[in-house]
Image: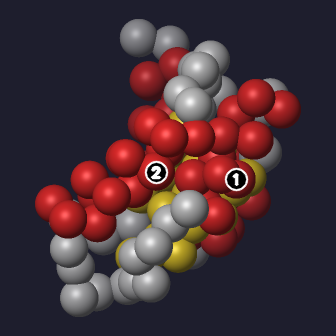
Amino acid sequence: MDYLIDLRNVVVTAPTADIEKYNYFTETKFKSEIKSKVAILTDSPNQMVFSTLFKMLNTQKLKEIEVFSTVEITTRWLNNGTKKEIVDVLGVLMNP
């Protein structure tokens, strides 16, 4: 399973220690033998720094994390053939 985390409307205030704790939590609670992709969508320097730290601190070798600033490139990287569905869902979530 691949993941798309959309942080575009989030103000991230988590310190590095919390990012490390979250990575440890996911490593111990969500072990997988299958490679997965995690795409993080950002639109501010704050989100980019947080996401890059999250990526750098990742210890799960089967979890490939990339940080993006556009929906187009994010969906292309995920490359799961459902670009329109992803864009539609993001649209609904952004405008409930």
**Front in this rendered view, residue 93 or 59:** 59
Instruction: Give the image location of residue 12, x and y in percent.
Output: 60, 24
Foreground residue among 88 and 78: 78
Q: Which mark is residue 52?
A: 1
Q: Which residue is mark 2?
A: 20
Residue 28 in percent (x, y) is at 20, 65
Number of residues whose C-alpha sits closer than 10 Å to that of mark 2, classed few (under 14), some (14–19) or many (20 or more): some
Above or below, comparing residue 26 to residue 81 in the picture: above
The count of marks equals: 2
Report the disc number at residue 14: none
Instruction: Please tell me whether residue 39 is drawn above or below residue 6 in the rendered image.
Output: below
How crowded pointer 1 is (Cα within 10 Å; few <14, some 14-19, many 20+) is rated as some
Name the quarter where the N terminus is drawn: bottom left
Residue in the picture at 26% in, 53% down? 25
Describe the colour scheme in one phrase: secondary structure
Residue 27 occupies which quadrant of the picture?
A: bottom left
- Compared across the picture, whether 16 is left or right of 45 comes to left
Amino acid type, label 2: Glu
For the C terminus, which image quadrant? Answer: top left
- Residue lying farthest to the right in this orientation: 45
Which comes sooner in the sequence, label 1 or label 2? Answer: 2
> Residue sitting at 37 percent across and 47 percent down?
21
Q: Amino acid at mark 1?
A: Thr
Q: In front of the other: label 1 or label 2? A: 2
Looking at the rendered structure, the secondary structure element under dot 1 is helix
Which residue is farthest left?
Answer: 29
- Whether residue 82 appears in this view of the structure is no
